[in-house]
Image: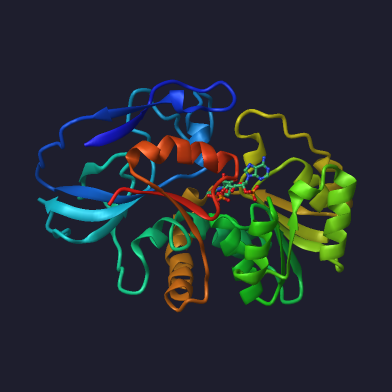
């Protein structure tokens, strides 16, 4: 069983040196346990936070242990009546080829139906990132038809879902993404009304002018994935009583300062700003996954994946995710 361990904690930007490849035997199965072969690892921005040893909403990733993370795979052996060999499952299998889990605890391993939905989608649009987009859009922004919703990291796993759900609710969806290819995809494939390549705008004035052009009626809802200048530029164009779903601020995950003048504008615009962590809202997952699963199964919700091959490629792919080298949901394929 090949595994990727956290070897050391990064100072600032992480490197492949912070990870180590190890090989251990596959453990024997005990009663109630299930052996899973991971087919896909999910790489997610939150993992950068867990590499630090600082207090946060998530526990730090322990050193010299398998990198934690969501996985999708297949049951290879089972001593649990609820799981049979061949079942497709998602769980928190970590960065390794195989894992053994006590599946008698509710929720640690979920069976998934791959008849109409590909297995990998359960780590993206029909999984945690999809529910994240759903929660922030539906429960916090709650757009009315005709309102304008702006989304940063719009071509990504979460952002792509947000804009499409906003469109489905009759709102105008405007994305921000890095580069012409990503912006073209966001408009032409995902169906956003417009997408701004923020890399073409070096200062606040220029970015805010681009937002003004893309959002002629101002901004009613903002789904925040990035932070910094993008947030300030959106705030300058925000309407009275607009809402912000504070989902992530990836531009600061390596410890970069994220300067913001936001508080004054929150008052001026009488805004509602709400942060959230999707795993603390398990009550909405069934409703969200039902909508997302239905939309993916019928081809109405589009998504894209960046797939690295083999466990050894996971660290490099993860570092790329933090720099925007991914284009869509970042996965590692093992089988
Ligand atoms: P993505 O698939 O969107 O990948 C990350 C993207 O972030 C990159 O592709 C890149 O896109 C963009 N990015 C990286 N660095 C910067 C930067 N300095 N400035 C601007 N953009 C940058 O990842 P996810 O969809 O998985 O996650 C999106 C956000 O959602 C993250 O902030 C994440 O932490 C957050 N999140 C929060 C959750 C919650 O419960 N609150 C749960 C899940 C995710 P580009 O090339 O366009 O710049």
Q: Picture coordinates of residue 257 (x, y %)?
A: 72, 29
Q: Picture coordinates of residue 36 (x, y %)?
A: 21, 49
Q: Quadrant of residue 214?
A: bottom right
Q: Where 255 sits versus 305, above or below?
A: above
Q: Picture coordinates of residue 12 (x, y %)?
A: 59, 24
| Relative to 206, 289 lies left or right | left
Task: Please name whichever residue, 208 or 61, is drawn nearer the observer in this view of the structure.
Answer: 208
In the rendered view, how is the structure colored?
rainbow
Is residue 193 in sight in this rendering?
Answer: yes
| Relative to 286, 164 lies left or right | right
Q: Residue at x 37, y 69 (%)?
A: 117
Is residue 107 in sight in this rendering?
Answer: no
Name the image quarter holding the N terminus.
top left
Q: Where 97 sits versus 184, above or below?
A: above
Q: Quadrant of residue 191?
A: bottom right
| Relative to 300, 192 lies left or right | right
Q: Picture coordinates of residue 312 (x, y %)?
A: 35, 36
Task: Please name whichever residue, 156 or 77, is drawn nearer the observer in this view of the structure.
Answer: 156
Q: Residue at x 61, y 49 (%)?
A: 247
Q: Residue at x 45, y 32 (%)?
A: 59
């Amino acid at each position: 069983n090949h595994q990727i361990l956290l070897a050391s904690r990064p100072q600032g930007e992480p490197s492949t040196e912070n990870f180590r490849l190890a090989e251990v035997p596959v453990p024997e199965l005990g009663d109630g346990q299930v052996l899973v072969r991971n087919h896909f690892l999910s790489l997610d921005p939150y993992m950068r936070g867990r590499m630090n040893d600082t207090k946060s909403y998530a526990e730090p990733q322990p050193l010299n242990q398998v990198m934690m993370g969501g996985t999708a795979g297949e049951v290879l052996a089972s001593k649990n009546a609820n799981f049979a060999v061949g079942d497709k499952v998602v769980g928190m299998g970590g960065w390794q080829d195989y894992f053994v889990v006590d599946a008698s605890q509710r929720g640690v391993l979920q069976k998934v139906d791959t008849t109409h939905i590909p297995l990998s989608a359960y780590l993206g649009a029909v999984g945690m990132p999809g529910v994240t987009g759903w929660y922030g859009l539906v429960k916090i922004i709650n757009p009315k038809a005709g309102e304008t919703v702006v989304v940063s990291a719009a071509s990504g796993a979460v952002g792509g879902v947000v804009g499409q759900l906003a469109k489905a609710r009759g709102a105008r969806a405007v994305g921000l993404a890095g580069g012409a290819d990503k912006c073209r995809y966001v408009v032409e494939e995902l169906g956003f009304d417009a997408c701004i390549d923020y890399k073409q705008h070096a200062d606040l004035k220029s970015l805010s002018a681009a937002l003004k052009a893309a959002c002629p009626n101002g901004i009613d809802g903002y789904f925040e994935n990035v932070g910094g200048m993008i947030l300030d530029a959106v705030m300058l164009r925000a309407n009275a009583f607009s809402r912000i779903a504070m989902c992530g601020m990836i531009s600061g995950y390596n410890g970069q300062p994220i300067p913001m003048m936001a508080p004054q504008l929150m008052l001026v615009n009488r805004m509602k700003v709400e942060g959230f962590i999707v795993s603390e809202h398990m009550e909405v997952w069934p409703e969200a996954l039902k909508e997302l699963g239905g939309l993916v199964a019928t081809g109405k919700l589009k998504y894209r994946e960046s797939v690295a091959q083999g466990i050894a490629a996971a660290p490099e792919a993860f570092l790329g995710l933090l720099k925007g080298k991914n284009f869509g949901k970042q996965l590692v394929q093992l089988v």
